[in-house]
Image (cartoon, rainbow, N blue to C red):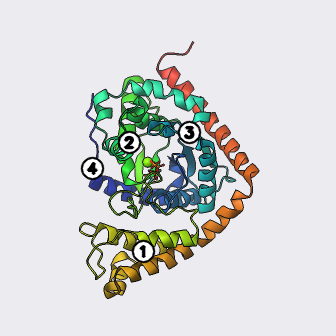
Amino acid sequence: MEKLTYGTYESTLERSRKLEEDLTKNPANYRVLTGDRPTGRLHIGHLFGSLQNRVRLQNLGVNTFIVIADYQVLTDRDSFEAISDNIRHLTIDYLAAGIDPEGANTFIFPHSHVPELNQLLLPFLTLVTMSELDRNPTVKEEIQAAGLKRINAGMYTYPVHQAADILFCKGNVVPVGKDQLPHLELTRVIARRFNERFAAQKSVFPEPQPLLSKSPLILGLDGSQKMSKSRNNAIMLCSTEDETAALIKKAKTDADRVITYDPENRPEVSNLLMLLSLSTGKTPETLAEEIGEGGSGTLKKALTESLNEYLRPLRKRRAELEQNPDYITQVLTKGIAGARKIAVETLDEVLDVMNMKI
Ligand code: ATP
Ligand code: MG
């Protein structure tokens, strides 16, 4: 069995750039699959790290599938009361950010509602080894961040489930943040091994490629780890302007008075500069120069104003969508039907090549 290697960030960045070029030229050759866990609402790390890329690709005419990974919530937490509410809020966040579910080519669906997708997990689990799952650096990091004492098997196997999420619709582009790269490497290996083992004549699955945004890792306001729904360090898309201001005010910086852009040595300040860059369109280097002696107070004030202004239209659409729960149900129902249609076809093909048809 060919070796699975996790994490070659530089080569992935390069591949991602090439992919970007071809996507613009030949959007019809691609199908996008991405998603989020319904563990809370979306934050600006999602927006800048992945969601904006999804919207852009959708607008280029690429088929877009967005999976809400509800089973995955159970990997690292006990509570499940909020799943349904979170599914609806994620959907609202997507639509507010510009995902257009009215288009014939966009589908939003929770994977629990697509049984044929979930069934792919079973053959896929036989294509990876326990030690490969055990070595996954993102899983290790998440186990540590969640402080888990008793780790369930779902935690180790959810990257395989994610392969089913991507491959059921033969997704070949996955716009993700940096934390997802090991998972995507696993999906590529599963696709390859499946084809080699069961479909040597004619491949069933493509090897999907990650598409990184300009900001593949937005740090949390604590500065030391990625911004995350579950780590209490995020600016949510649904936060009010005052809440946003208060969160930025509390954000960690460092003792150096003059502002410079130096992601390696000054991660906290550089992260704030990157956020300011994303909401103004200026480069972080230019912004650092402009602010310079003004120090972190000036930086935070500028970020609060720019970010609130940048998010204002999105937040307005969000508030309107919240008033229309029936519409959200309709969007999800359509998404589930579209995803299921394709999942049934793929499972049929899979059972056929595995010699399991009766
Ligand atoms: P949780 O804490 O519940 O795991 P999360 O904030 O990590 O939530 P996910 O639903 O796990 O969010 O991730 C959804 C997508 O958003 C993935 O593609 C992931 O790479 C991307 N993403 C999440 N956080 C960031 C971030 N801080 N910067 C860039 N991209 C991010
Ligand atoms: Mg996560």
Q: Quadrant of residue 233?
A: bottom left
The image shows residue 357 at horizontal and vertical percentages of 55, 16
Distance Cα–Cα, label 3 vs label 4: 35 Å
Quadrant for the C terminus, please: top right
Return the residue at label 3: 80
Distance Cα–Cα, label 4 vs label 2: 12 Å
Residue at 47% across / 68% down in the picture? 247
Distance Cα–Cα, label 1 vs label 3: 37 Å
Return the residue at label 2: 183
| Image side of residue 181 versus residue 72, left or right | left
Q: Cβ(mark 2) to ligand 1 < 8 Å?
A: no
Return the residue at label 4: 8
Q: Nearer the viewer, mark 1 or mark 3?
A: 3
Decide: few, some or many residues near mark 3? Use Cα within 10 Å; few <14, some 14-19, many ≥20: few
The amino acid beneath tag 2 is His
Residue at 47% across / 28% down in the picture? 121
Q: Nearer the viewer, residue 87 or 357?
A: 87
The amino acid beneath tag 3 is Phe
The amino acid beneath tag 1 is Ser
Whether residue 204 is visible to the viewer of this picture, yes or no, is: yes
Cβ atoms under marks 4 and 2 closer than 8 Å: no
Disc 4 element: loop
Q: Nearer the viewer, residue 30 or 83?
A: 83
First in sequence: mark 1 or mark 2?
2
Residue 154 — which label? none
Q: Does 239 appear above or below 28?
A: below
First in sequence: mark 3 or mark 4?
4
Cβ atoms under marks 1 and 2 closer than 8 Å: no
Q: Quadrant of residue 152?
A: top left
First in sequence: mark 1 or mark 3?
3
